[in-house]
Image (tube, coloured by chain):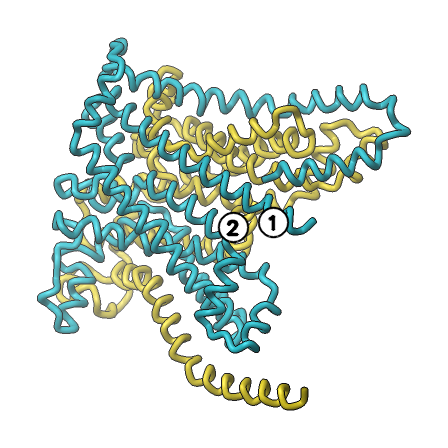
Amino acid sequence: MTVTVEQGARAAGRHRHGGPRRPRIRTRIRIRDSYALFLLPGVLAFLAVVVVPFLMNTGVSFTDWQGVGSPDWSGLANYRELMDDSAFWASFRHSLFMVVAMAVVPTAIGLVLAAALFDFVGKHFGSRTAAVLRACFYLPQVLPIAVAGIVWSWILAPDNGSLNELLKAVGLGSWQQDWLGDPDLALYSVMGVMVWVQIGFPLVVFMAGLQRVDPQLYEAAELDGAGWWRRFRHITLPQIRPEIHVVLTWCTIAALKVFGAVYVLTKGGPGGATDVPSYFSFTTFFEKTQVGYGAAISTVLTVLVLGLALVGLRLQTRAEDAEEGLRT
Amino acid sequence: MTTSVRTARTGRTVRTVRTAVSRYPVLLALVIAALFMVVPFLIVAVNAVKSPAEYSADGPLSLPDGLYLDGLKSFWERVDFGQKLINSFLISGAVAAGAVVLSVLNAYAIGIGRIRGRTWVLAFFVLANVLPQEALVYPVYYLSKEAGLYDTRLSVIIVFTVIQAAFGTYLLSAVLGRFPREIIEAARIDGANRWQVLWRIVVPVSRPTLGVLLVFFFIWTWNEFLLPLVMLISNDNQTVSVALGVLQGQRLMDATMTNAAALLGVLPAIVFFLVFQRTLTRGIAVGAVK
């Protein structure tokens, strides 16, 4: 993404300073090399905090280890065991539900909300109103997930919980549920909470993206008689496609990593009904102390996340390249 | 020509009338949706100031009769909330400052120094940033025990400084890649060395972006849960997030206490939100498009 810009700038720089200043080339090379010194603290810190632990974790995933003594090499045994572990498959299946709740639904709602706030509220009621509404939607995003979990587990509590009380108050008492305690419902309740948590992020990104769009496009379309839906489909969506890619990628990654919400809301329960890979690996590490097995779970999760990130980056780079190409 | 203009104009007035009629229902729907987002905060605030007796008599939906602050006070004392706030501020503040410095150094080498292989270095930082913490948590736990850093705030500060700096490096490298070269060349010709160029020119000029990063790192670290949960086990070192999450996980709190906990957890977030609102929304836009 930066590469295109940099190459352009460097080419321009050469053009300007090339030719007459040939003799300086040697010093330039020396200067460029010594910039690497500035990278030294960062690289060392990364080796110590990220690279070494990550390699250790991957290594441990090929061993049988309880966290004390020395690990016993067991080859792929942990991974073979994973393949037959229904709890493992269940946790990844729940991850798919989380992707729906944290990436797909918030992106869809975020798009409609962003278009409505930007194109409609912003135009007819002033940008202040739009900004206040946007702030309301964004608020859950700054909340620590642990706190959001406390708030919602209390609202969804079976006895005296606000949601059940509300249902009773409006005469729908028969709809009362043990929202987080019923194995058939718990996952959907957690999903609902995650939509609430997540929605602000796509909204804010999309609204920022819309500011880039030339208002004349909308005016022209409006003059041609295009209704709100057609403007949304044929102008808004194609214009902010890069933002949509970015949001979908990051939200999907966040959904695969979700931990705090599950810890605070359900602890993976009832009966594993809301277990997700990160929580599964956490309990395997620290409650069952099967460190090798936990490492295998987190390694699988890591491969998935890194793969997704690479695809996402590729999409983003391609979109930006296309944009650069259009501009020049 | 004239006719077409006229039809266009009448068409427009018809449309304006129509939108004026449909305007308020749409706004109303949006306001209701926005209220739905905020209502959980309001319910928590309302119930945190009810006495237990009032809560059990009237349930969660009634308005409070008066301000009952003993619930908040006893919760504050019971979990030593002041200490938790200090810990959170200390950790988040140190991480934010440290991660910005580290990001600046990295991005200076990558974005302005254009060191060889910078695309790979950058890709490395990006991947380090998306790496699930689950893949680091056990070795970090183990190594910090070996190093005698387990259950210290310093260990969490070190780890998050590095993790946040990964994102900062990624973002700042893109920003500095477009830094006007002429300014740097001019300073070099005037005899400034690279260190001086960095602190006297690059940092002051990039201050708005650095401010955004500082705010983001602070709030992200404040909200972090998994690693602090694993690393900080003693009460004196726990952050707000961890303390509240653990309490909730133990299922020992009654309704009033839960609300006190929730309100005390929500308040700092709302304060940050109000203080940093502009930076936050602007920053997300910068971060997403880069």
Q: Name the residue located 58 percent from the left edge and 61 percent from the top edge.
A: A213
N-term-proximal mark, 1 vs 2: 2
Q: State how far apart marks 1 and 2 are (Cα).
A: 10 Å
Q: Name the residue located 19 percent from the left edge and 47 percent from the top edge.
A: B253
- Label 1: chain letter: A
Q: Is mark 2 on a helix, strand or loop?
A: helix
Q: Where does label 1 land, which residue?
A: A323
Q: Name the residue located 35 percent from the left edge and 63 percent from the top edge.
A: B38
Q: Colour of chain A?
A: cyan
Give A82 or B170, whichever is nearer the viewer. Answer: A82
The image shows residue A65 at horizontal and vertical percentages of: 24, 15
Left of B160 or right of it: where is B194? right
Q: Is residue B57 above or below residue B216?
A: below
Give B81 or A131, whichever is nearer the viewer. Answer: A131
Q: Is residue A25 above or below residue B187?
A: above
Q: Chain B is drawn in which colour?
A: yellow
The image shows residue B97 at horizontal and vertical percentages of: 55, 36
The disc placed on residue A242 is: 2
The quadrant in which residue A305 appears is: top left
Quadrant where the N terminus of chain B sits is: bottom right
The quadrant in which residue A84 appears is: top left
